[in-house]
Image (cartoon, rainbow, N blue to C red):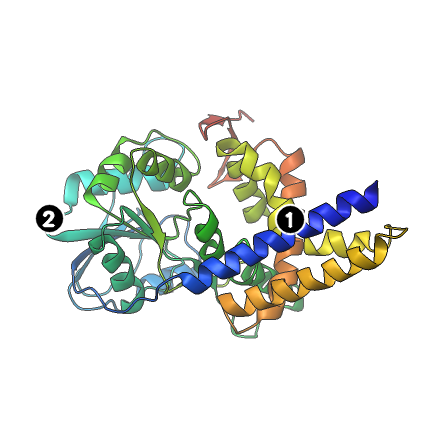
Amino acid sequence: MIGVLATAWALAAIGFTATVLLRLARKPGDRRESRAKILLVRAAEFLTARERSNLGRPLPAGVRCLVLGEQDLGTLPTHSVQLRLTPHGHNRKLALVQAALRQHGPVPGEQVIICDADVIVDAALLYGLAKAIEDGVDLAMAAPLPELGDGTESLLRRFTMASSRGLLAHSAHSFAALATVDAHAFCGKAIALSPRAVEQLLLLEDCIGEDLRLADAVLGTDGRSACIGSPAHTLPSAGLARFARWQLVLKAHRPWAFIAGPWFLAPTLPLLGLTLLVRGPLLPLFCALVAVLVASRVVLARRLSRRHAWTFILGEALYLAAFATALVIRQVDWRGRTLRPSLGGSLVKVES
């Protein structure tokens, strides 16, 4: 029985990988750039030293930038303004962005782009997102691509950073891959919004996973989403806790996607392990299918980003660890507070 089930799982994983590869091959490239006026909004709270330095990077000409946060941010680029707003509710980022858009923008002709503080903003990212909105998309995202650091980190931290890059840039969990099979797969690291999407954003109630709720709201009213070709390069990312929190958010918003994730997004290591358990006449077929799966995942990793493609296997391992953690935890430590997400992403503060 285990051989039949394992073989069926391997076939399903291969089919999923093949579907993603075919749709990525058909995805058109970004052939022209936008020159739209851009309003860039960036929440800036609880920053690391690298994030604070990142906010000081120069921006392309013609970009108006609102940086939202109460702490001293030092020197900001030209045409950047810091707004010292007081957020209300548990999701401080959502509250800050909503307050800024209500009070300070956008002016007619400006396209709204929201980027996290750890995103390395450049012209390709901004104008790629803006072009997608010009082409009729309501929500455009750029798939995050974490950098690997400068080589001065400890061996353990370099390992965790490589795992994060493998998960977000080279595995089937890359949002560039996920977006080809599920329009609701949406990441809020770097996004552009149409006027209709801005209206929906302003209507969102306090929640965790505002990007998922926004995608559901826009797509539920016949809107369109897209992932652009240019990635959102981010500062090095590390830590199981962050990805476990993402899994807990996913479980709150989309329980079916949470359960299906390990079967399709991180099957390689479990199926390799099952080659030691399967017996009988199905063993040669099963081993052949696992070999095909590994080969197809390597091809997918290289198709998504050629550099460091081998990290996909570390990414799948990180995904499984985060999934297992989210199965047992019920609350998250988030920006200095302990919160419990409920179904739909609403938040309840846990009293200490």
> In which quadrant of the rendered image does the N terminus lie?
top right
Residue at 36% x, 40% y is 215
Image coords of residue 130 (percent x, y): 24, 58
Image coords of residue 187 (percent x, y): 42, 49
Q: Secondary structure at mark 1?
A: helix
Which label is found at residue 107?
Answer: 2
Image coords of residue 196 (percent x, y): 21, 39
Q: Could one spot residue 177 in this view of the protein?
A: yes
Q: Secondary structure at mark 2?
A: loop
Type of amino acid under label 1: Ala
Q: Is residue 90 above or below residue 83?
A: above
Label 1 CA crowd tier, 10 Å (few <14, some 14–19, many 20+)? some
> In which quadrant of the rendered image does the C terminus lie?
top right
Type of amino acid under label 2: Val
Q: How many marks?
A: 2
Residue at 73% x, 59% y is 290
The residue where tag 1 is placed is 12
Between marks 2 and 1, how big is the CA–CA gap? 49 Å
